[in-house]
Image (cartoon, rainbow, N blue to C red):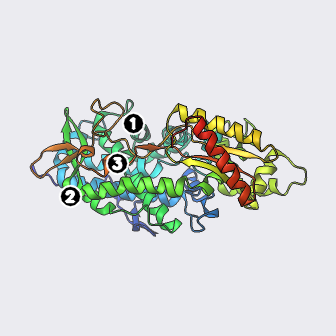
Amino acid sequence: MTAFRQPSFLSSDDHPTNRVRCPVHGFIHYSDNERRIVGHRLFQRLRYIRQLALTELVYPGANHTRFEHSLGVMQVASDAFDMLAAKHGDRLEAEFQTVAGFESKPLAWARQALRCAALLHDVGHAAFSHAAEEAVHKDLGHEALSINLVESNDHLGGTLDALYGEGFGATVAQVLKGPPDLLPQLQVLRDLVAGEMDADRSDYLIRDSHHCGVDYGRFEYRRLLESIELVDDSGRLELALNGGGLHAFEALILARYQMSTQVYYYRLRRIYDQYLIRYHQSLGPDAFDTTQKIIDANDMTMLSRIMQSASETIPSESSLWAKRIVNRDHHKVVFAPGIHVVGGHDLAAAAKVFDAVEAKYPDFEFLLDVPKKPVRVHKLLMPDEESGAGGVDLMLVSSAGERRPIARSSQILSRIPKTFRPMFIFGNVESKGLRKEIWQYAAAQWNVAGGTV
């Protein structure tokens, strides 16, 4: 057997005869069957959901959408799969051949399932993407809705089954769900879409960087794709990396850290996220209490609603937040102890400081912004985490076939924080002198409460 296995096409309608231009990847090619998925109303809806919500109010070029990102993820995932097939096609073929329905063309079926999962991974996003997610999706998140839409016959599941056979939509949904619902043989597909060096983050880091006009998210993702390998682990295949890709992988993790701290959790972007959350909450608990209500809304319809609320002459809670957005009249940062607020003690300290500031300056309105959970940068095991609980041991493979956890092979990775959690107190305080006074008072209260320095 030779390693190289070029995936064939499932039918004449699965040849990539269509193409669309992309500012990141050049041409993205897709088939006639995939064109039916792209043309589906649920996927077309992503044209009207921007990738970074109201970030354009801070970075004017950030008007790109989930539509172009999803196409890009499909392209990167496919490129990674083809790289693996060129080096380990025989092993992949043997693995996928054990999946029911994949027997005749195992690589072609696996590749198609991967492409569809990559294409549809964000289809459940609510208006304004992550920004208003906690108000719309509550505790479930957009991932749960994406899976529901992909496996439901009334939504995308019926289309996928009609194109590729009964049960294909369920298979794609399994790839998006991951364990324990996912067949172990298909874990490689899951990791290519949503792993530690996946297509999703590769595309959004480069794409967001491009549209925001910053360089933080740029890294050698093509070198990373060239370096992906496969290793056997207890009889199953797992993704690994050869030594030539170590620096590219380090750059990926560093890019995610820098984009998260400098763009995604930048103070001005966060205040507009807070306005969106509060505006959506002001609409009441039944505004987005069904799947249909969520997918009927997009950035355009909600912006129209926000503008209408902002023009109301009778003040209301919704009009208050709408006016802040439309008039770009935002609160200012009056205290920020840093981005590495950590555990429960710091959260308690944050609440104490906020209460103290409100009591000390009752004539002003303050907003506290602390993510409920730490922001994840990576899941790699560090040298002091010998138990391995809750982490990923991504392997670095030498030319001689020796394996070593990548986190133990890189001094850079061992120093990049695995998580961070920024804290901001915003106030409607215009005077710079008064903001400085409040900051000094809050800092003193933070120290008294024992907050992390």
Judge by depth and name the residue closer to the eye, 121 or 172: 121
Judge by depth and name the residue closer to the eye, 269 or 336: 336
Compared with 365, 6 (above or below) is: below
Asked whether, in this view, residue 155 is left or right of residue 54, the answer is: left
- How many marks overall? 3
Q: CA distance from mark 3 to mark 2?
A: 21 Å
Tell me which amino acid carries mark 1. Gly
Question: Residue under circle 2?
Answer: 244
Judge by depth and name the residue closer to the eye, 318 or 33: 318
Tell me which amino acid carries mark 3. Arg
- Residue 364 coordinates in the image, percent (x, y): 79, 48
Asked whether, in this view, residue 280 is left or right of residue 188, the answer is: right
- Residue 179 coordinates in the image, percent (x, y): 37, 32
Q: Residues within 10 Å of mark 3 (few under 14, many from 20)?
A: few
Q: Nearer the viewer, mark 3 or mark 2?
A: 3
Mark 3 element type: helix
Q: Residues within 10 Å of mark 2 (few under 14, many from 20)?
A: some
- The answer to whether residue 418 is visible is yes
- Residue 218 coordinates in the image, percent (x, y): 40, 63
Compared with 303, 183 (above or below) is: above
Tell me which amino acid carries mark 2. Gly
Q: Residues within 10 Å of mark 1 (few under 14, many from 20)?
A: some
Q: CA distance from mark 1 to mark 3?
A: 29 Å
Report if the CB atoms under discs 1 and 3 are less than 8 Å apart.
no
Question: Residue under circle 3?
Answer: 415
Q: Nearer the viewer, mark 1 or mark 3?
A: 3
Mark 1 element type: loop
Asked whether, in this view, residue 138 is left or right of residue 79, the answer is: right
Q: Residue at x 53, y 58 (%)?
A: 263
Question: Residue under circle 1?
Answer: 178
Q: CA distance from mark 2 to mark 1?
A: 29 Å
Q: Which is more N-terminal, label 2 or label 3?
A: 2
